[in-house]
Amino acid sequence: MSFYEYYNKYKNFNYEKFFNSISDDDIKRILAKDKINEEEFLALLSPKAEQYLENMAQKAHRLALQNNGKAIEMFTPLYLANYCVNKCAYCGFNCENRIKRNKLNMDEIEEEAKAISNMGFRNILILTGESAKATPVSYIVDAVKVLKKYFQCISIEIYPLTQEEYNRVVEAGVDGLTVYQEVYDEQIYDKVHIAGPKKNYKFRLDAPERGCISRMRNVNIGALLGLNEWRREGFATGLHAKYLQDKYPDVDMNVSPPRIRPHAGVFEDVYPVNDKNIVQYVLALRLLIPRIGITISTRESAEFRDNLIPLGVTKMSAESSTEVGGHTVKNESDPQFDTADKRSLDEVLNSILTKGYEPIFKNWMHI
């Protein structure tokens, strides 16, 4: 059974009725359990559970220490190109947005790699806009060959690939995959993805599983919070992560809780999501899947990121730029979105150490 079939049983689920049925005793009972099921996970996302965030935080903290210790894996993004063929209402790379487009050649990629490597990073996430014509798989493979000289861990966040293509990039040296479904509600998905190959909901939904089949070491998923009511999207993301973790136990599953940031273009149909909401979401995820990895990017403010560390964060970015070649090539393209945490790497590291955690630049490599 595919995740689409699994998730479809909640297609007509009455979330409001369910949330209204949750009592204080329900939350207390759930928090006393060693293992929770999917409906109990949804209960922890309910308005009623907001009153128990401290209890949830204490348990999530214990589980995070048991399963992940006090290590925070560090990475930075490297944008290779921003050409895109999709018309997505919420994205700065929207093909109809009049932004400066750019694509790095292999020499420029090596220049970026040297600059990032000299900062100490050994874990990198490479990104492109979604254009198989501008950045074909062959281009990604060639870029990975360059990057392998400088980094032990290379993850990709590009357009969804076929099974054969994922096998190809894994063979080239890619060991991590990030694919955000953006929004799990199929009707909203169709509405905000106006045109382009990204409009294919099922092909994107199945991409993380294709990555697992290709033996990616880690797979990162998430919904872009703000495109739909956050509780529903958080629930769908948790279900997706658990489905993949249970089916592919050798893969390290990660979830990111990104929310919409300012970007080129205008998109005003945003559902509210605040810091407290994200905290509740992160805590509930940890209680559903105790070993889950949780990534917090520089979309979030410095203060908020620091406060999330003890709650189970396992991976953080630093020195982030969403411009193509943003570490060495300045003002040659427009960013995908604005970052909120603009601290230097040293400042981020000091904050992590102050919290009693250890920043890790390398924790795995090919043998």
Image (cartoon, helix red, strand yellow):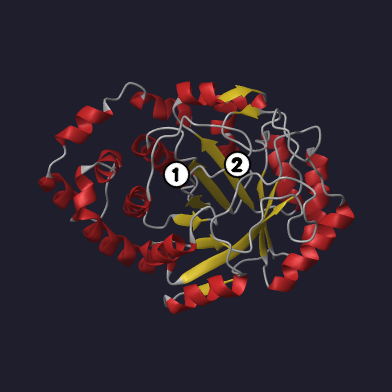
| Residue 364 located left or right of residue 81 | left
Q: Secondary structure at mark 2?
A: loop
- Residue at the (66%, 65%) spot, across then down: 365
Q: Is residue 238 above or below residue 318?
A: above
The residue sitting at the left extreme is: 25
Q: Is residue 320 above or below residue 272?
A: below
Q: Nearer the viewer, residue 158 or 193?
A: 193
Mark 2: few/some/many CA within 10 Å (<14, 14-19, 20+): some
Q: Is residue 64 above or below residue 275?
A: below
Q: Mark 1 or 2 closer to N-term?
A: 1
| Residue 23 located left or right of residue 100 | left
* Marks 1/2: CA–CA distance: 28 Å
Q: Secondary structure at mark 1?
A: helix
Q: Find out whether the residues at labels 1 and 2 contact each other: C-beta distance under 8 Å.
A: no
Any part of residue 255 in sight: yes
Any part of residue 150 in sight: no
Residue 82 in the image: state x and y as whole percent: 74, 41
Q: Nearer the viewer, residue 212 or 32?
A: 32
Q: Amino acid at mark 2?
A: His
Residue 212 in the image: state x and y as whole percent: 57, 44
- Residue at the (68%, 73%) spot, across then down: 120
What residue does disc 2 label?
263
Q: Is residue 41 above or below residue 162?
A: below
Q: Amino acid at mark 1?
A: Ala
Q: Nearer the viewer, residue 12 or 175?
A: 12
| Residue 229 located left or right of residue 315 | left
What residue does disc 1 label?
241
Residue 36 in the image: state x and y as whole percent: 27, 48
Mark toward the viewer: 1 or 2: 2
